[in-house]
């Protein structure tokens, strides 16, 4: 999944990026509200982690502008521990969740997973489609209970599709959500990863919808 991280503290931003990437996410980042707003308004993200105390443009203003423009991406705001008024203002501005500093990385990752699941109408951290199970907490994939080893790109691709079972997803959408902005994007590589997944998973799991993209086959 692709995450936008908007945080001005370079140490915390680096720690968060490392933790998110180790959990299998692709991360774009900004260190001020103006750049964060621009990225959120022009790029496709699965969730946003937004600090409220940002330079140039504060986090609340960023969030309000996104919501006023109709942007529905889930947003987790970061607040100071004792700033209850920031939490209230953030939720009123359209935040989906909040986390007070300091916090444990495990809690932030759990909240990010929950936001992404809820945005797709999913309740369980264990995603299941036919014989294939993907645990969003551990990053493990199994077929009929037997573990399957996937590369990071293969896992991200499968995870994106399993969050949207039965939905046709275009190669362009997959490319936008699997690669960061500064990555040399090539939608043709999606076909390569789809082919690799089909060799590791039940081949009928991922359907090709001619001229449109790919769809995860719903279990019969």
Image (cartoon, grey):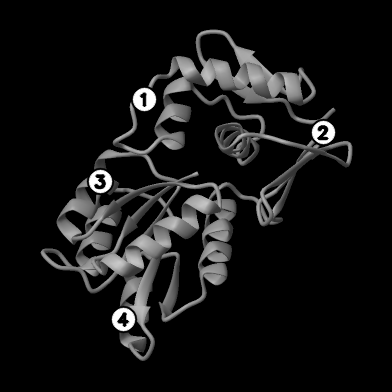
Image quadrant occupied by the C terminus: top right
Classify mark 3: residues with Cα within 10 Å, few (<14), some (14-19) or many (20+).
some
Looking at the image, is mark 4 or mark 3 earlier in the sequence? 3
Looking at the rendered image, the disc whose residue lies closer to the viewer, 4 or 3, is 3
Q: Nearer the viewer, residue 117 or 154?
A: 154
- Vertical arrangement, residue 85 with respect to residue 123, above or below: below
Q: Residue 183, how many percent across, how many down?
A: 34, 32
- Vertical arrangement, residue 141 with respect to residue 193, above or below: below
Looking at the image, is mark 4 or mark 2 earlier in the sequence? 4
Q: Disc 4, disc 3: CB below 8 Å? A: no
Classify mark 1: residues with Cα within 10 Å, few (<14), some (14-19) or many (20+).
some
- Give the residue number, with chain letter if any, for mark 2: 130
Q: What kind of element bears circle 4?
A: helix
Q: Residue at x 51, y 67 (%)?
A: 108
Q: Disc 2, disc 1: CB below 8 Å? A: no
**How far apart are the alpha carbons under marks 3 and 2?**
36 Å
Query: Which mark is drawn over residue 86?
Result: 4
- Give the residue number, with chain letter if any, for mark 1: 185
Looking at the image, is mark 1 or mark 3 earlier in the sequence? 3
Q: Disc 1, disc 3: CB below 8 Å? A: no
Looking at the image, is mark 2 or mark 1 earlier in the sequence? 2
- Give the residue number, with chain letter if any, for mark 3: 39
> Seen in the image, is 113 located left or right of residue 177?
right
**How far apart are the alpha carbons under marks 1 and 4?**
38 Å
> Seen in the image, is 81 located left or right of residue 155?
left
Q: Residue at x 56, y 16 (%)?
A: 192
């Amino acid at each position: 999944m692709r995450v936008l991280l908007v945080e001005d503290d370079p140490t915390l931003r680096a720690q968060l990026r490392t933790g998110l990437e180790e959990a299998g996410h692709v991360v774009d980042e900004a260190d001020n509200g103006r750049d964060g707003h621009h990225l959120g308004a022009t790029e496709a993200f699965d969730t946003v982690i937004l600090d409220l105390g940002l330079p140039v443009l504060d986090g609340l203003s960023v969030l309000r502008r996104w919501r006023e423009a109709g942007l529905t991406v889930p947003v987790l705001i970061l607040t100071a521990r004792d700033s209850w008024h920031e939490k209230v203002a953030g939720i009123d501005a359209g935040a989906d969740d909040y986390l007070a500093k300091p916090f444990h990385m495990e809690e932030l990752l759990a909240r990010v997973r929950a936001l992404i699941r809820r945005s797709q109408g999913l309740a369980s951290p264990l995603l299941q489609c036919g014989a294939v199970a993907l645990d969003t907490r551990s990053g493990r994939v199994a077929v009929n209970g037997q573990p399957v080893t996937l590369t990071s790109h293969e896992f991200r691709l499968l995870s994106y599709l399993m969050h949207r079972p039965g939905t046709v997803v275009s190669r362009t959408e997959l490319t936008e959500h699997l690669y960061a902005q500064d990555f040399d994007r090539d939608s043709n590589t999606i076909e390569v990863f789809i082919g690799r997944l089909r060799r590791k998973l039940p081949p009928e799991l991922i359907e090709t919808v001619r001229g449109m993209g790919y769809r995860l086959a719903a279990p019969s």
